[in-house]
Amino acid sequence: MTQSRTQRARSRSALPGAWAEQRAWRLLHQRGWRLLSSRWRCRWGELDLVVAKPGRLLVVEVKGRRRCGADGWGVAALGVVKRRRLARALNCWLAEHPEQAQHPLEVVCALVPLPPTGGAVRWLRLESLAAAQGDD
């Protein structure tokens, strides 16, 4: 069976994101984090990485960028709508993993420069997602 043009385009566009997630995961693994979920999806959104250390839980939104834009590496992509999706997906993930709900939780964004740009991964702590949930 052959892929449609749309499927091939989606496949190619997913490669940089997958590469960025792998790079972020390697750095976290080197720092002693254990992977709980990767590219976890529910109807409300997706969590790129969920990792843990004893007594700590970290949710990582990964953004791969080819160049630094006016907004400083794509931080604008983490607007209110995206934060709402993250919060809802996180609540769904915690409902499926209630044993993890007792641990202190932090949500960060890994801003990963894609080749050929290169450079260090930047970690941006996201403030409480509760404020992003709001009412629809």
Image: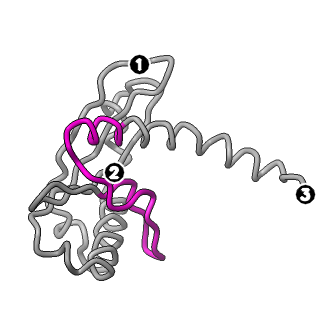
In the foreground, 85 or 36 = 36
Is residue 133 highlighted in magenta? no
Q: Which residue does the image show at 33% across and 64% down from the upper left?
A: 86
Q: Amino acid at mark 3?
A: Met
* The quadrant where residue 49 appears: bottom left
Residue 31 versus residue 105 in the image, above or below: above
Q: With 78 as the anchor, is 33 left or right in this view?
A: left
- Where residue 70 appears, as percent x and y from the top left, is 35, 28
Q: Nearer the viewer, mark 3 or mark 1?
A: 3
Residue 102 versus residue 47 in the image, above or below: below
The C terminus: image quadrant: bottom left
Badge 2 is on which residue?
61
Is residue 25 highlighted in magenta? yes
Disc assigned to residue 18: none
In the foreground, 74 or 100 = 100
Range of magenta residues: 24-50
- Where residue 17 appears, as percent x and y from the top left, is 50, 42
Q: Which residue does the image show at 40% across and 27% down from the upper left?
A: 113
Q: If you read the primary sequence from the N terminus, does the residue marked by circle 1 or circle 2 appear first?
A: 2
Badge 3 is on which residue?
1
